[in-house]
Image: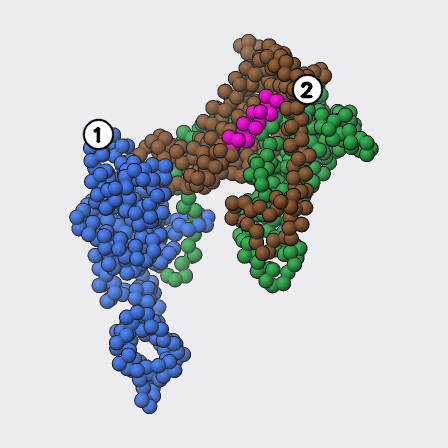
Chain colours: A green, B brown, C blue
Amino acid sequence: MTPEAPPLTARRRATCRGVLPGFGLSLGYTLTYLGVLVLLPLGALVLRASSLGPAGILRAATEERALAAYGLSFGAALVAALVNALFGTLVAWVLIRYPFPGRKLVDAIVDLPFALPTAVAGIALTAVYAPTGWLGAPLAGLGIEVAFTRVGVVFALVFVGLPFVVRTVQPVLEALDPHVEEASAVLGATRLQTFRAVIFPELWPAMLTGFALAFARGVGEYGSVVFISGNMPHRTEIAPLLIVTKLEQYDYDGATAIATVMLGVSFLALLGINAAQRLARRART
Amino acid sequence: MSAAVSSLGRRSVGQRVQDEPPAARAALIAVALAFLGLFLVLPLALVFVSAFSEGVGAFVSAITHPDTLSAIRLTLLTAAIAVPLNVVFGIAAAWLISKYEFAGKSVLLSLIDLPFSVSPVISGLLFVLLFGAQSPLAPLLALADVRVIFAVPGIVLATTFVTFPLVAREVLAVMQAEGSQEEEAALTMGATGLQILWHVTLPKVRWGVLYGVILCNARAMGEFGAVSVVSGHIRGETNTLPLHVEILYNEYVFAGAFAVASLLASLALVTLVAKEVVQWRARRGRTPLRPAPEVGA
Amino acid sequence: MSVEGIALVKHFGGEGEVAAVRGVSFQAPAGRITSLLGPSGSGKSTLLRMVAGLEKPDAGTVHIDGRDVTRIPVREREVGFVFQSYALFRHMTVADNVAFGLRIRKRPKDAIAKKVSALLDLVQLGEYGHRLPDELSGGQRQRIALARALATEPRVLLLDEPFGALDTKVRVELREWLLRLHEELPVTTLLVTHDQEEAFELSEHVVLLDAGTVAQAGSPTEIYERPANPFVAAFVGGANKLAGDRDAFVRPQDVGVRKAHGEDGDHVAIVERLVRIGGYVKLSVAMKDGHTITVQMPKHEFDERGIERGDRVLVDLRDVKTFPRGDYAI
């Protein structure tokens, strides 16, 4: 062995590479379960989609009503995710940085959208923001309509997406080394300068991840939206609702085409989320 | 709000020299609380207020209506099947992914995350296409006289599909964080795979499993989109609680709809409390849980 | 019950903290403590894990008591393993931890209880059976891990940096305690450590590893007195490397200095720095050829000579180990 020997290569110790028993059993069980529950249904979709052919999918998926529905689903999800990126980060900041009475309770409430069935959220939001509702009435007085408009769709998606941003930003905020901010202050930075130059660069990857998660969830959301949106074709009809409508009319091909387009976009969104998380990890190390 | 600012919490982050001025803090807290109030608290409060808007009698009769009771039974049945299935799967998948290196692991992880990134409506559609009237399987199912779509099996399948990542992801996160040294130690002492799983691994990850069960159960009982597509909305037969809420609401039986919704909202509150308790116990046992169910796809 | 490794090889893909082993043969005599010593990344822990069966070697064989156990799974190898982090079962009491291997083997309850209490007494923690591991100090956890490993009466005891996570005082105490324990219970023991003092104090046989190969194996005296190659000479005793066309090393305590009185030549140096550390003094002296070497001498000797910082001194190299250049291959 000479000193020019190639550099040492190694691997994590946390895993133990097949020494523990049970590989065959757990692999077999996992694959069978996923096969029946995921691959088989997915196969049914692929089969149906391929029988339509690319031209058929394109034709069904690009009719005007469908395009309007995508526009609303993606557009409203985008706006809602932006709102959440901003306010979700603010909520996370307040919860981590400022002690106030009832903070633990507020922190627990943030997970409400994860726990509350979407249909319940849907009828509740509708009732709150309907023209006769608790908030809908005063807003109507100001000439603002929420329920049964596109704004209502955004409101429902803000509700649904909020915890994604808060829960991704919170751990990053908590892990921030306070000495870094103190160092910045000692060097003469104002609080705002410190936020811009020291805190925000640590925070944005998490904000981006939370944004992407909230967006992905918003695009596919159904239960909380269908009640408040009013479901006017071309105007306030979201893409998932269009799939349901097509299914109710036994238009399986139309439903499959729209679903295929949405799955494609979701897949791209997932790639985006993974990229954002890789970026976040790299930024943190 | 200024009173809120001056009181210090027990957490490590107290008032530091380098913090924002009190007025700015108060303003930020106020904005955050207003935001949460408008979007989360107000709708929740409205559910309970509306449930009793026509009196306790109306509430009770809505809850005890045979269709409601049948919806409760179906919802409980669905969760009772989906949750245990997903627990066993979650433990097997987490063991597989955390203990071994093998090709295709990331593909497997993506498959597990799939239901998170798919619209619930599409999840339902998948099963309609697989088992519905136009499916290649349809003649076979007809022959065996098995109904899946517009029947209970479809509801259970769709619910299981939508909720299985919740347990698997949670258990996996804890298993990965805990590492494998205790399992290796048990192995050197002569334990078999099952003995290791039962005596070492499961006690280590039990809070993760329980956390996953809580999340999975909440979603299983509350799932709307996927179940709506496969159910067919047959009253007294294929109606779960969330679907029943929809029917009542669409028939303008508002108080009834909110009465049934208040049951589900109570379930959500119980879920939140149970989550906090498990998180607290896990922290005490130094088990790291994932911060949120669906974060970290 | 000896342990033998023959031509063991283990490579890893990816990155991380586990080092490769590139063809290691070694022997650990029966009933003795053998140390696997080396810097981090030398492959010593990987080697130990291969002996336990926690890693499968890419090539080579492991023999316990003359029998080839390479294909025998971990659970049938009858080894006791103490992890650096102890890997105690946190949800079990101390007594349940120690009893684990026996319960797995379905020993009768009263026999287990008796054995556990004997072992707890042996590691001087008889009163602690009902505690949880989190309620013990580091040194106590270490001893419990040892008791747990000994419970099944293993043929071989494997210790992976057993004192690595402890502070210096506890480490020194436990070292002496381990020696006494081993006298009482002479199990064949393999000990992985990066601390040469620990290896020399605890073991009669030391296998010194460097970058996944054996640099030298032998008694502590052999390794100290007759290093086989420049790596060993430099690693053991913190030796100074000297200038010249051959690899030459000298240990700080093998260098003498006294005040120079007008002499000149290659052996005259300037004292750049001196530090008093308890009973001895450490000096850095700059040689004429530009090298700085470290000198260590007893305090009383130093005080007699009246040396101060900046003084010119005569350097006397007493025990220089030299190796021909280019003979780096092992």
For disc 2, the marked residue is B53
For disc 1, the marked residue is C108
Q: Quadrant of the N terminus of chain A?
A: bottom left
Residue A23, quarter of the rendered image: top left
Residue A57 rendering spot, x and y as whole percentages: 70, 27
Q: Residue at x 20, y 46 (%)?
A: C187
- The amino acid type of the residue labelled 2 equals Ser
Residue A216, quarter of the rendered image: top right
Secondary structure type for disc 2: loop
Region of the chain picked out in magenta, as a range: B262-275
In this view, the residue in front, C85 or A57, is C85
Chain under numbered label 1: C
Residue B77 rendering spot, x and y as whole percentages: 52, 17
Determine if residue C311 is in view: yes
In this view, the residue in front, B66 or A261, is B66
Residue B150 rendering spot, x and y as whole percentages: 61, 14
10 Å neighbourhood of mark 2: few (<14), some, or many (≥20)?
Answer: some
Return the mark for residue C123: none
Q: Residue at x 38, y 55 (%)?
A: C41
Check the image and report above or below for B262 versus C75. above
In this view, the residue in front, A207 or B263, is B263
- The amino acid type of the residue labelled 1 equals Pro
